[in-house]
Amino acid sequence: MPGDKVEVAKHGLRVLAILSALMGFASISTDLYLPALPSMARALRASPGMMELTISGFLVGFSLGQLLWGPIGDRYGRRMPIVAGLVLFIIGSVGCALSDSAWMMVSWRVVQAVGACASVVLARAIVRDLYEGARAAQMLSTLITVMAIAPLLGPILGGQILIFSSWPTIFWLLGVMGALTLAAVLTLPETLAPERRNHQPLGRAMLHYLTLVRRPQLLGYAGAVGFYYGGLYAYLAGTPFAYITYHHLRPQLYGLVFGTGIIGIMATNVINARIVARFGGTRLMRMGTAVAAVSALVIGLDAWTGWGGLAGLALPLFVFIGIAGFIVANAIAGALMQSPERAGTVSALVGAIQYGSGIISSGLVGAFADGTPWPMGGVILLCGLGSLACAWLLVPAPGKIRATV
């Protein structure tokens, strides 16, 4: 294992680029084809609601698939399961490109998601294999900063593709990206030595999730990031209507306002990477959840009363979204420290909670839609308070934290 760390350190930028690509598969797999949804609906003779199932189906596959890949990565190492996942992603992308019905598209999107999530969950486990404590949080912040470019460029690139070609080209491009990433992964050394692997049968290893969820400290970290991600997905589901329809923001300006939140995420991740070694990841995570909870209160107040208009809603939303850099990386790093011998399984549990909360929160925003921003604001308020409670009630104060092995 020390030799692997030295080998990886010699190629730091290349490894950083590969890990960023692996962690960015969730965003690029969805953001790239968003501009094509209307033309896909026409071509596949499907309703807009049916086409939205291609997004929710992807999230379901992405969330549940992680629970499978985590134990596999702990038993067989990181590299080959990532390779298998990328092959599955390529097959799913080709299936999407060749789909001639909406249900076929949804099915292939689930296959695509199950393959893509292997890259994300095991990339985080690789970070834990190579780094510990504040250094792991630094690396995760750096990776999140780099991968945040995907939501900014994905819709733009997808729109440009549609000018010159049709929507299947987007999925062919995703398949090519998967193949290029696969070739790059094959150049990486294995980071989990055979003697550090979990050799239990996979069925028994899956049961280890029951042990993990009984650890309050780990649930504190996982819950903090899970509730926060629930708020992020409520934002994604609710802001198009709240900004454009309710507050009459021009659609051309929506992307600009949305982009400011992504820039905020990138900025706080850069800051977190610089100061986490000095202040500690848990302290910064707690501070981040406190800021998120306060901004969520303001969001809920504006969404309920209309006080402050568009600015009164957009400004606290910017704060809520932008503070991600102090919550996500530090919470994930803290969770991975709780059971380092099963980093893949812990990473899978955290990832499933992250994206599972997104499915629930975005569904709640849609279920309680009433023509106002309140359903979005109410869900974000609950998620902000939930994240705060997990970080402050379940995670011990800095200095009292210890890893559980």
Image: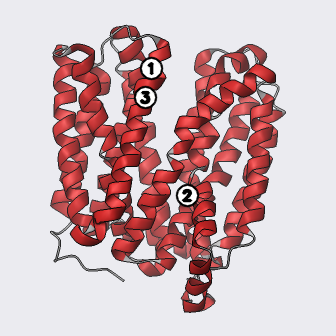
Q: Quadrant of the N terminus?
A: bottom right
Drawn side of residue 97 relative to residue 57, left or right: right
Nearest the eye: 156 or 328: 156
Q: Position of residue 49 (x, y in %)?
A: 58, 19
Label 3 Cα crowd, 10 Å radius (few <14 / some 14-19 / many 20+):
many
Q: Position of residue 298 (x, y in %)?
A: 17, 29
In the image, what residue occupies the spot 56% across and 79% down?
Answer: 9
Which of the labelled discs sits on residue 200, or is there none?
none
Quadrant hosting residue 30: top right
Residue located beneath label 3 in the image: 258
In the image, what residue occupies the spot 34% across and 9% down?
Answer: 246
Which of the labelled discs sits on residue 254, or is there none?
1
Quadrant hosting residue 190: bottom right
Residue located beneath label 2 in the image: 66
Quadrant hosting residue 283: bottom left
Q: Position of residue 53 (x, y in %)?
A: 60, 29
Residue 338 in sight from this viewpoint: no
Q: Quadrant of the C terminus?
A: bottom left
Q: Secondary structure at mark 2?
A: helix
In the image, what residue occupies the spot 25% across and 23% down?
Answer: 313
